[in-house]
Image (cartoon, rainbow, N blue to C red):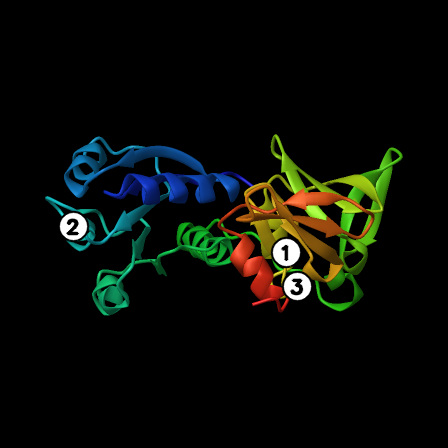
């Protein structure tokens, strides 16, 4: 799958950095970031090679809605905002999608799929019907093997390679965890760190890590994984602990 080249206009540095990281985790190439709409508007005058724009709505100088109105209609735009009341205006401006903060990976994957459809570059990322809907291919012994998701504890990405842990460590065809989530959209997989995606049913237990804000997650097979501070509350909730 050819990476989408995207740009971001977001005036809050932490939100900008987080969105860029999520886009990169989903296999995109973030070609430019801007702290306000005026900077992006000036950049777009040079007709850069970009597949999609992610625009915050409330920005100083030139807000996202005004920026969209100044751009060619053919440029796919996704609005990102904390205010749902802007949705009608966004779609009146022919936005491809509208994301509410905080953006989640599964929702971002859908937005990227809409950009691909808009560009006529849609690729089939849905799981196949029938028995293979819960299986996926990995390389093994110079050949290929199909593993059951139900026997998989977690997925880990390292240097654009996703590894599956199902008793042993297997190399998959995927390059990002976002692709795994898109392939199994209804499996309830949970991101506990930017590089770790677990199957909650494979969790055997939790224990405190250091100060207690983070936890170590014990998976089937005996492996312990550390959940990030931000992911820990959602993990506890999914396991029925909160």
Cβ atoms under marks 2 and 3 closer than 8 Å = no
As measured in the structure, the alpha-carbon distance from the residue carrying label 1 to the one carrying label 3 is 9 Å
As measured in the structure, the alpha-carbon distance from the residue carrying label 2 to the one carrying label 3 is 38 Å
Residue of label 1: 183
Question: Residue at coordinates 27% horizontally, 60% vertically from top-left?
Answer: 94
Q: Which mark is residue 166?
A: none
Q: Earlier in the sequence, mark 2 or mark 1?
A: 2
Query: Split into 4 quadrants, where in the image is the C terminus?
Result: bottom right
Residue 102: in sight, yes or no?
Answer: yes
Question: Residue at coordinates 66% horizontally, 63% vertically from top-left?
Answer: 187
Query: Which quadrant of the figure has residue 10?
Result: top left
Query: Which quadrant of the figure has residue 193?
Result: top right
Cβ atoms under marks 1 and 3 closer than 8 Å = no
**SS at circle 2:** loop
Residue of label 3: 187
Mark 1 crowd level (few <14, some 14–19, many ≥20, 10 Å Cα): many
Image position, residue 227 (x, y; %): 59, 47
Query: Which quadrant of the figure has residue 45?
Result: top left
Residue 125: in sight, yes or no?
Answer: no
- Asked if residue 114 lies left or right of residue 106, the reply is left
Q: Earlier in the sequence, mark 2 or mark 3?
A: 2
Residue of label 2: 63
**SS at circle 1:** helix
In this view, the residue in front, 197 or 4, is: 197
In this view, the residue in front, 18 or 181, is: 18
Image position, residue 230 (x, y; %): 48, 50
Image position, residue 228 (x, y; %): 54, 45
**SS at circle 3:** loop
């Amino acid at each position: 799958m050819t990476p989408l080249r995207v740009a971001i206009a977001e005036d809050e540095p932490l939100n900008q950095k987080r969105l860029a990281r999520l886009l990169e985790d989903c296999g995109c190439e973030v070609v430019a970031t801007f702290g306000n709409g005026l900077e992006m508007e000036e950049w777009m005058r040079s007709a850069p090679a970009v597949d999609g724009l992610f625009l915050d709505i409330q920005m100083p100088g030139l807000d996202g809605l005004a920026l969209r109105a100044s751009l060619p209609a053919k440029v796919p735009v996704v609005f990102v905002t904390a205010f749902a009341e802007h949705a009608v205006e966004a779609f009146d401006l022919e936005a491809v999608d509208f994301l509410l903060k905080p953006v989640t990976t599964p929702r971002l994957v859908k937005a990227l799929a809409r950009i691909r459809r808009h560009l006529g570059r849609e690729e089939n990322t849905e799981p196949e019907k029938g028995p293979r809907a819960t299986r996926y291919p990995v390389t093994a012994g110079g050949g290929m093997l199909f593993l059951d998701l139900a026997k998989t504890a977690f997925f880990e990405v390292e240097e654009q390679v996703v590894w599956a842990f199902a008793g042993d460590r297997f190399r998959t065809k995927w390059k990002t965890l976002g692709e795994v989530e898109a392939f199994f959209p209804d499996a309830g997989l949970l991101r506990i760190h930017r590089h770790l995606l677990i199957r909650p049913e494979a969790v055997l237990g939790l224990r405190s890590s250091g100060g207690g804000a983070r936890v170590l997650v014990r998976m089937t097979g005996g492996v312990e994984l550390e959940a990030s501070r931000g992911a820990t509350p959602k993990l506890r909730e999914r396991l029925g602990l909160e």
